[in-house]
Every structure is written in structure tokens, then in C-alpha cells.
Amino acid sequence: MTKTNPGRFFEDYAVGDVITHAVPRTIKMGERALYHALYPARHALHSSDQFAQSCGLPFSPLDDLVTFHTVFGKTVPDVSLNAVANLGYAEGRWITPLWPGDTITATSEVIGVKQNSNGKSGVVWVHTTGRNQHGEVLMSYVRWVMVRKRSDSTAPEPVIPVLSTVVAPADLVIPHGLDFTSYDFALAGEPHRLGDYSVGEIIDHVDGVTIEEAEHMLATRLWQNTAKVHFDATNRTDGKRLIYGGHIISLARALSFNGLANAQMIVALNGGAHANPCFAGDTVRAWSEVLDTAETQAPGVGAVRLRLVATKGGAGVLRGEDGKYHPDVLLDLDYWALMPV
Amino acid sequence: MTKTNPGRFFEDYAVGDVITHAVPRTIKMGERALYHALYPARHALHSSDQFAQSCGLPFSPLDDLVTFHTVFGKTVPDVSLNAVANLGYAEGRWITPLWPGDTITATSEVIGVKQNSNGKSGVVWVHTTGRNQHGEVLMSYVRWVMVRKRSDSTAPEPVIPVLSTVVAPADLVIPHGLDFTSYDFALAGEPHRLGDYSVGEIIDHVDGVTIEEAEHMLATRLWQNTAKVHFDATNRTDGKRLIYGGHIISLARALSFNGLANAQMIVALNGGAHANPCFAGDTVRAWSEVLDTAETQAPGVGAVRLRLVATKGGAGVLRGEDGKYHPDVLLDLDYWALMPV
Amino acid sequence: MTKTNPGRFFEDYAVGDVITHAVPRTIKMGERALYHALYPARHALHSSDQFAQSCGLPFSPLDDLVTFHTVFGKTVPDVSLNAVANLGYAEGRWITPLWPGDTITATSEVIGVKQNSNGKSGVVWVHTTGRNQHGEVLMSYVRWVMVRKRSDSTAPEPVIPVLSTVVAPADLVIPHGLDFTSYDFALAGEPHRLGDYSVGEIIDHVDGVTIEEAEHMLATRLWQNTAKVHFDATNRTDGKRLIYGGHIISLARALSFNGLANAQMIVALNGGAHANPCFAGDTVRAWSEVLDTAETQAPGVGAVRLRLVATKGGAGVLRGEDGKYHPDVLLDLDYWALMPV
């Protein structure tokens, strides 16, 4: 009869269930200021109302990852509490920009379950949707996690969703009004347009940031993500706090400004792996690989598909000879961003 | 002829004096964002404008403790600078919610003085009132501190105020318009209503947060609380910075979401003790005891009186056999909050 | 053919060049809240809309150093990336207050170059101007840095600008409408007016703050200052992160409230030296020397010229017998502020 949240176990997920995640959250300019303090974020569209207006938007939207983190944070009490591992992301799409003053709510539909052969855990796939106060979809994505079982209950019929490995360019949603025909490259910080990037090109983002406990905790709390491992040094026997994987995503994305200053808005998350854990004291660097480019219907706006790698080591190194991620690699993210053609 | 503030000594307080505290402060959404980054605060009424509107409020007020910390911070240069100990709180009442854009000012009336038998210090009672820019009372509370004497001056006539040990339910002020009849428990995060809690019930809030120097200093500075001991590592011989007691109050209150998600607004502070000092590196947990419940005049709104304990140890442990606080206990707070019936 | 910014070398600066710095930045109340969390800033004009209104302003402007830090941060990728040393500031003037919602852009004109005799580096002088979204000048200042050469190229014709050692009182720009005739000294925190200060007077600001890595990084990032040395612990062989000199300026200025609470607005930066590097763990104190006072045309408004010294040691100590800065001294800043007469 405990009043506290015990979290859901594998048995508590049935395909078709829709979970309403708690605590709607109003996001304003305070969150943007903190985002800029926590990450070396400099993309002009998210920094200046006037720059955003010169690109056809009413004013500067929050960084796209603010939507992701806030929605993700809401799912933690319902999805992550008894999760053993965060296995993957797919089919993430940003549909509507997040404007200051918007209130975010989130729901998740269970779209797959598969018990592990050990009978002690299983994989759960959820399709999570974040909405604003008008009911408009801000973003949605599929995530799958390994979750502990509560008991020796019978395995459910396995349902494994078929997921795209990449969001098709035709399915990318371009923010209403976006127009890069008058794009100011000098104010944006770099002269490189979509045509200047080649598929296969590797960009070393050069800069590094050494991680502090206080900073990753401030960030993770800001998204109301309450997972114990990020905050409680007594939770692991080595006394370390595990850093929220999304902190590394935002850090790497911000570092990627240096070489990808014009990859202005994230519109799709094709996939992602948190390759190795990260701890305070680690110095995080980032590199990108250009995976694809595409046209869009919006004037002057192209799309670039990027692999973004966060690492404690050098650029270009991803996997060892055994095919496993190199121990220095923290994050391997596959996303689409919008860039002037 | 120093230009800096030497602080008040025991001799500088006379019953009936009213002290105007310096530096009015405008609070907006930036402070709310920081509050959410500094504490795992998730109470829905303070997180979402839409949720607050569904409860009859115009939009989401700042967390009630923001008012307390800001008012308290203003009193520090006048009350705490030569204080040896913060002895207690009583009769704290929140009268008007703090809305973004409000400017807080504070005054304190001296309501009691009593010199200690050692002749070197004395106890001072002040009744502190915080007001908004319209002159409306935001909150008021009584606090008493032990203050050093400047000299061997004669002891003043002792005046010891008679203080209530608890704010009577009839004296609780319910924010104008508050209505919990359409309260959305799913969005709020827990299904428990007032009737689900029993007097004497203990709630272990489970989660822990390990404290960082940067975080408690950011928080304490945010309230313009300038007490040296919180910021200057050379101030104590052990090189430790003493953590502002209010930081522990906010941390424990935020942790109490897990089990008390529907204890939405703090309306009274009946009493409180900072049982032991807290330092960076400590992992803080919290537990609550239900002390009482009461009805209010507002539709669907009840009140719950809670003991909130912050501790470095386990739930339920408060005092040793000697009647003294257990060394693990950091905070013992007694307050009223509003909860759907 | 790297996509990342290699920075400018000495050869890349020619007198008369105007550099447009990247990434305009909209500043709102979130940045103010962070400023108050990062520094013990308490000057009433920057804390309260109502106090600012009582001084003739429409509402409370951002702290003047927010303008400086944001403008300075924008120049880093173009001026500091290959800089060996930040040599000095001169002729800094604040022209228009920074209001919440303003967007800052910055440009720098190269006004001097002089190759060093070693042929490996040179000094570059830039006149930097920050503007708001209306094109109005927020502030401007001259800064000179020592920059590495890329190659053995021929030295350019040296051009050494003639710089004033102090901004003349007649050149100080008083914010439109500023009026201190109804100034509330009690709310501002101290009774001292301009006439109470004597030229040559030393004020020990008493309080100290021990610096944390997380705090100086949050602050420096907030201004989108991306200089590697502040963030990357692997950048120096001793594993230390060098603290942004501007962090020390803001910290010392905030500490100077205690004794200079009425030095409300900074209107000129006459000069400044970052005397010694500062690292996390250092406890920073501050003292001021009154260098001059002046009248202004605005009602009730005077100006005070102050030397602001940040130090790890005691008040009043500036240089050793050798004329060099004492090793404890971190900052020696010369500025004009406005104060009620």
C-alpha cells in the first residue's frame, strides 16, 4: 500500500495500452537561458528572435532537443523506473516547434513487447508523443527499453514492431513559414551551405567539455527526469552518478556548431545508441559524418542526415575490430537537420 | 566609519522596531526555470499554466518556497549576519500566491528579545512579512535567532512572544479561485486524495540527491541570501561550506512529490528545525508523516498537515533515545499543504 | 578544407577591417535570473522593476555587465581563438541599457596592429560595438590582444591607436530618464551617497566566494563564449580550466555591493587588467578604491570612478615592490558608475 511510485514492470505493459504521463510543463525563456548556460549552444535560429524572423518564423523557437528532453523526462516514471537498459530510438519526428509559453504533455502507446529468454526481463517498445497546449503534436518517437519482470508470470505473445531505419525525406515536417532564401551566413557563423557537404564527409568539431556533476544534474532535473541513477551517488557501488544520455546528446549537438553552424533545426531522429556510460570528469568531444542530403519543399531549405558521435577520444573512431563500439564512444546518433541549400 | 554592513548585534533590536529590508526583487519565469533545475520539483500546479487554470487559478504561481526563500534572503543582512544559530520558525502563512512579474519586498518587526544568561548573546524574535508590488502580503512568519552582543551592555527587559505551535485550519488562506473539483489526478502524477492518507502514516519518499557545492550556492545566491558561511570555504576551519537550511527544505519538499504529488500548495509553516548541518557530498533523502487533515471552504480542497524530514539515513528515524535529533536528520519541518479531498 | 573555424591569425587583421561577429542573441529574464544565481548581485536598479521605475526607467535593465559579456563572447571566435594574451581594455562606454527582449549583435573594427619583435606574434587592437535590434549602440570598447602569426610573413606597418586612459565625465552617457532625486536608500541597501565617498578611500567588500568549476562554466557558456581553455580540462598540462576573466569581473562587481550598494549603473570601462589567472577552488574577495567623482546632467545623478580589485588576499594590496601585481591579485578594473549625489 505504498504511496510512492513502484514503476511498471514488464508484465504491466500490453500492446495497445496508452499511458498518460504526469505533470504537464510550461516552458518559457528561463528554460532557454538555462539551455544556453548548460550547453555551448549557438545555432542562430534558436538564439535570436530577429534571426528566426529573417527565416520566416514568428520568433525564436526553443532548441529542438528541449522538446525531446521534456517529453522523455515525462516518460521516465512510467517507462524507465525498472528499466535495465535503454535500447534504442527510431522514427523520431519533430512536427511543431516549441515556442516560449507552450505547455508540454506526453503520452506513450505500447507498440511491442517481447520477453527475454531468461524469463527475468523483456523488451518493451513505446511510441511516445509530446503535445502542446493546443493538442498539436510537438514530436513523436519510438523508444525501446529492457524492463525487469515482477514475477515468473507467463510470457505474453511477442509483438515486435517493424521500424524504419531512417525517416524518409518526404516525411520530414518543415516548420510552417521556414524560408532560408535570405539566410545570413555571416550572422549564423559559417559560410557552408548544404552543397558544400559531401556524403561520407567527417567533421571533427574540435572542442571539448569536461563534465561536472552539478551541470548534468541541473540539466536532467530541468527536464523533470527523476531517474535515481543520475542524482544519487549511493545508488551504485562505485559511488558514481550515471549521466543522463540526453545530456550527452545536447552537449554533442551544441559542440557540432563548430563545422555545422547551419544545421539549424533537428527534424528527425532516425536512431541512436548510448554506446558507453559517461561520468563526471570525462571530457566529451564530438564528430559528425554526413550520411545523406535531401531537398525539401520549403524555399531555400535542404536537409542533411548526420551521424553525430560523442566521444572521449578522437574523431572518426566508432567501432573496434570486433564490431563493438570503441570504449571511448559515448553516443552514436542519426538525425536529420535543416540547412540552407 | 566602514561603508560595509557590520550587521545588527543583540543590542540593536528593540521590541516594536520595524526593519525595512533592502533590495526589492522582481521574480519571473527565469527563477521558476532555475527552481526546476535546482530541485526535483514536479508539483503540477507549479509546473503548468494549463493545470493551474484547471484548478481555478489564472496561471501557474511560483513554487511557494520561492516566496519564502526570497523574503528570508532579504532579512539576512539585517537579522542573520551576527546570528549564532537559527532557532525556529512559527506561524508562517502564505497569503497571496507569487505570480511571475511580482516584485517582493520584506519588512520585519521585532516582537521579542531575551538576553542569554552568559551575557554574550541573546535571542531575537522577528515577525517577517513579504509583500508584492501592490502592497499585498505574500507571506509572513515568525523566526527567532540567537545573536551576538556587541558589548557588555545591560540586558533589556525580556519579552518572549507567545507563539502558536500550529496554524489553525480556520486560519489557512486558500488562494482566490482555487477549486479542486475537476482535479486531474493522472496529470498530477498520483491517484491519492486527502481521504487516502491517515494521521500517523509515514511516507518514505525513496529517492535521494547527492549535494554539490555549485548547486547549493546557485540556489542560495538566487534568493540574494548573502550569508558568508554558504559561499566562502575559508570561513570555517574545516574548509566546508555550510548549506543554507532553506536549500534542504526545498530539496526535501521536491523529493516528497513521490508519495505526496497532490500536496499541491504550501499554505502554512507551523514550525521547523534545522536539526543538523548539511555539506556537499551528503546524499539527502526525505520522509513525511501525516500529522493532521482538515477541511477548507474552497471547493474540493482539503488541507493536510505534514511533518517533512530530510535525512541522510532511513525513513521514520527522527530522534535518538536521548530525545535529540538523530545525527542523520537534517530537517524537521511542520507545514500545511492543500490537497484534493 | 576544414569546416571548423581555425580562428584568425595576426596576418588576418588589417587596420580598417570590420568584422561581423556571429550569432545574434536575444536576452530575456532567464538570463537575469541566471545572473543572480551565478553572482551575488544585489544592486536594486537591476533587481526590481519598481525600484527602476522610481529612478525614472521604464523597468529594470539587465546588469550592465550582461551586455559586456554577451558582446565579448561574440568576439571570441574572431578575436581570441589564436590569442596568447588579453592585454587590455580602454574607452568602454555603455550607451543604451539592455532591456529584456533585446537582441544583441556585435561588430569589431581593427584599429591597430603591431608585430612583436620575435616575429611570431603581434598585438591587435579592435574597437568592438554591441548593438540592439534597433541598431542602437548598447556599448563599445577597445580591446587589445596578442595573437599568434600563421607564418613568417612580413610585418605590417605598425599602427598603434592613441587611447584615453579614462573616459571623461562629459562623455559618460546617462540612461534616458534616469533621475535619482527620489532615490530610496533604505530599499537600495545603504545610506551612502556620492558625497560620502572621498577620493583615495579604500573599501574592503569583506565577503568571499569560493569558485566552482560548474559555476564559471555555466556563466561563460551563458555568454556563448566558447574559448576552449574555460571548458576543457585536457587543454592544459596541469588539468586546470582557466576561468574567464569576465567571470571575475562580475563576481567582484557583485561583491562590491557591500559598501557600494548605490553605485548603481556602470557607464564606462576606463581600463582593466586580468592580473593573474584564477582557478576553481580559489576564494575571491574584492576591494575598491575611489579614484574620482563627477557631476552629471541628470537630476540627482553623480558619477564615481572606482578601481575594483579582485583578489585571493587582503584589501588594499595591489602591487609588490617590483611594481608587478601581487600574485593574489586577479583583477584591476577602472570604471565609472552612477550614484545618487
Image: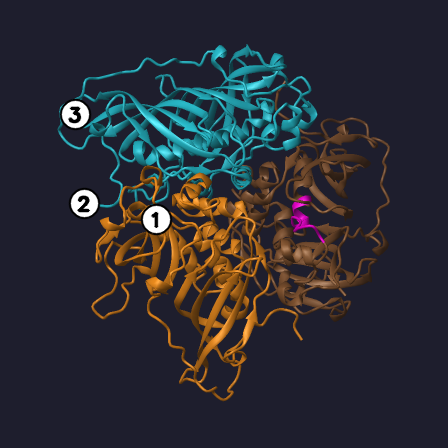
Chain colours: A brown, B cyan, C orange
Examine the rendered structure and indicate whether residue A259 appears above or below residue C194: below
Residue denoted by label 1: C255
**Is-magenta flag for residue C10?**
no
Residue type marked 3:
Gly
Closer to the camera, C137 or A31? C137
Query: Which amino acid is tagged 1?
Result: Leu
Residue depth check, mark 1 versus mark 2: number of the one nearer the observer: 2
Q: Residues within 10 Å of mark 3 (few under 14, many from 20)?
A: some
Q: Secondary structure at mark 3?
A: loop
Q: Which residue, given by chain and number where applicable, does mark 2 sit on?
A: B1
Region of the chain picked out in magenta, as a range: A57-67
Q: Pointer 3: what residue? A: B119
Determine the chain carrying the residue at label 1: C
Q: Mark 3 vs mark 2: same chain?
A: yes
x and y percent of residue B272 in the render? 41, 22
Label count reads 3
In the image, what residue type sits under mark 2? Answer: Met
Query: Where residue C87 sits in the image (x, y, percent)?
Result: 39, 70
Nearest to N terminus: mark 3 or mark 2: 2
The reply, left or right, for residue B60 in relation to residue A111 is left
Taking the spot 42% from the left edge, 62% from the top edge, the residue there is C93
Q: Is residue A61 above or below residue A132?
A: below
Indicate yes or no whether the magenta region holds residue A61. Answer: yes
